[in-house]
Image (spheres, coloured by chain):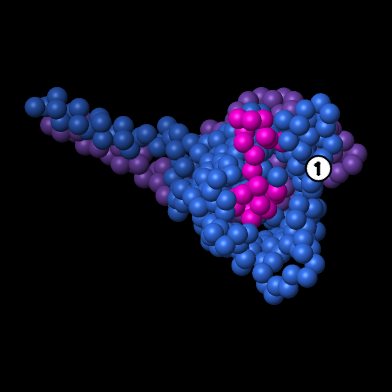
Chain colours: A purple, B blue
Amino acid sequence: MKQTLLLLMLLLTGVVAGLQTGSAQRYYVTENQTVEFVSEAPLERIHAHSEKLSGILDLQTRKFLFQVPMESFYGFNSPLQREHFNENYMESDQYPKARFDGKIIEEIDFSKNGTHRIRAKGKLYIHGMERRITVPCKLTINDETMEVSSSFSVQLSHYGIKIPQVVSQKLSEVIDVQTQITMRPKNE
Amino acid sequence: MRYKIYALLIITQLAFLQPALGQDLEKLLEEETQDMEEQVITQATFKTTRIVNGQSIENASPKELIFVVSHHFGEVSTGLYDFFGVDYSNIRLGFEYGLNDRIAVGIGRSSFNKYYDVSAKVKLLQQQKGKRQVPLSVSYFGSAAATAIRYEDPERQEDWTARLNYVHQLLIARKMSSKLSLQLSPVLVHSNMAPTSRSPNDVWALGTGGRYKLTNWVSLNAEYFYTFNPEDEQNHFNSFSAGVDLDTGGHIFQLYFTNSSGMIEKLFISGNNGDWLQGDFRFGFNITRVFSFGKE
């Protein structure tokens, strides 16, 4: 009798744990997103964007992971410039994705609507090199969706990207990056 | 028996509990994005529209104008008196324009035999990865050229079409890795009037070419055209050229040695090549400047 009861309890807790995670919207994923960057150099302004950013946020642990394929960036001043971006600077064949993974520092209540100023701290991988950064973001919770926007800058030399002397007037050493992301609960 | 049941239960329980403990974000994200895998067309199989003298798989991009200045100097074997050939040069000026994603057209004028040429290059297949894997790029290159040189005998009367020749070429290329690209190019050169009565009107050749990137800005290029039935069997040498591509951001400099005097197919495939072993090769360069008239 005792054993049967124990068995039953074990079974129940298992089912409850399963159900609980099934119903709670624990993971949020990107639904609508753009990431863009600007290089402001004395002789040229270069601007490109991608809509192929994807990411996931775990509300329980506040951990996140975002990534974007380098070859999905468009909007350069010319096709040749896009080719240079992929072939000569980012080496997209070898390093196809840029990635940011880490954790939100602030503990926030994701169940209530509101706007929060948060800091996302983590490792940014570009061009096969990683660096720890903290990105200030604005996070807006609106019922089932979440809006995250941020802007930060990337110094090319930190990621092993060299600018040849001949184009130093056309390409900035510091690139400004902006993201605008809408997230929704992940489908189970 | 009891133990087995317990063990089984604990395992199933762990399976249920596992999501509560947190799954690997990377795996979850992969799950989410697996259907969105992007189709990526291979870029920059070659740096520019020519490997050396011959056409590469690359086209001028849409709304892009390419200006190519090509120089071939005299043969190196002429020695110091002619400064190893640099005292002589023949040039070709060319423009290429990308009409759309697939078609580019070009015009050119060569000083050698005063040739005017028009051409079109059409992308038939593009190497790409993603859901649909395409291992090769294939393009068709067609050109017509007319020589404007006067006949030696001023009394000679020929129909103007006798001055024309046509080129049909298939370009088959693959970017093997980020460093190495290879190309195979079967080609037919048809001349309306052959130089002698014994020369063929249709000259067939098979071209091979490649590029190896030394750095992100410099590559080694080489090409070889095997001509099956040259116009002048006795004095024919196959065209072989090798050099480097230097990409400076806006200009591409191609510096090379070649045994061919001309820059269009009629000239380097049908004949007009020197013997490498006798030092009958020349220094040459192409300077390519790209102008863009539309945002990418």
Q: Is residue B225 above or below residue B196?
A: above
Query: Which residues are drawn in magenta?
Result: B262-282
Alpha-carbon neighbours of circle 1 within 10 Å: few (<14), some, or many (≥20)?
A: some
User: Which element type, helix, strand or loop, lies under badge 1?
Assistant: strand
User: Which residue shows up at 63% across the image and 25% down it?
Assistant: A130
When asked about the image quadrant of residue B88, the answer is top right
State the residue in front, B24 or B40. Answer: B40
Residue A93 visible? The answer is no
* Amino acid, disc 1: Ser
Give the x, y percent position of residue B216: 67, 32
User: Quick check: is B62 in the magenta stretch?
Assistant: no
Horizontal and vertical percent position of residue A97: 58, 38
Chain letter of the residue beneath label 1 in the structure image:
B
Quarter of the view holding residue B255? top right
Report if residue B77 is visible in the image.
Answer: yes
Is A104 in front, or is B296?
Answer: B296
What is the residue that sits farthest to the left in this orientation? B1
Q: Looking at the picture, tell me which residue is in the foreground, A65 or A75.
A: A75
| Total marks in image | 1
In the image, what residue occupies the spot 67% across and 72% down?
A: B161
Which residue: 62% across, 66% down?
A: B193
Q: Report which residue position mark 1 lands on.
A: B89
The foreground one among B280 and B198 is B198
Q: Is residue B280 magenta?
A: yes
**Could you tell me which quadrant the C terminus of chain B lies in?**
bottom right
> Is residue B31 toward the left or the right of residue B213 in the image?
left
Q: Quadrant of the N terminus of chain B?
A: top left
Residue occupying image coordinates x 55% and y 58%? B199
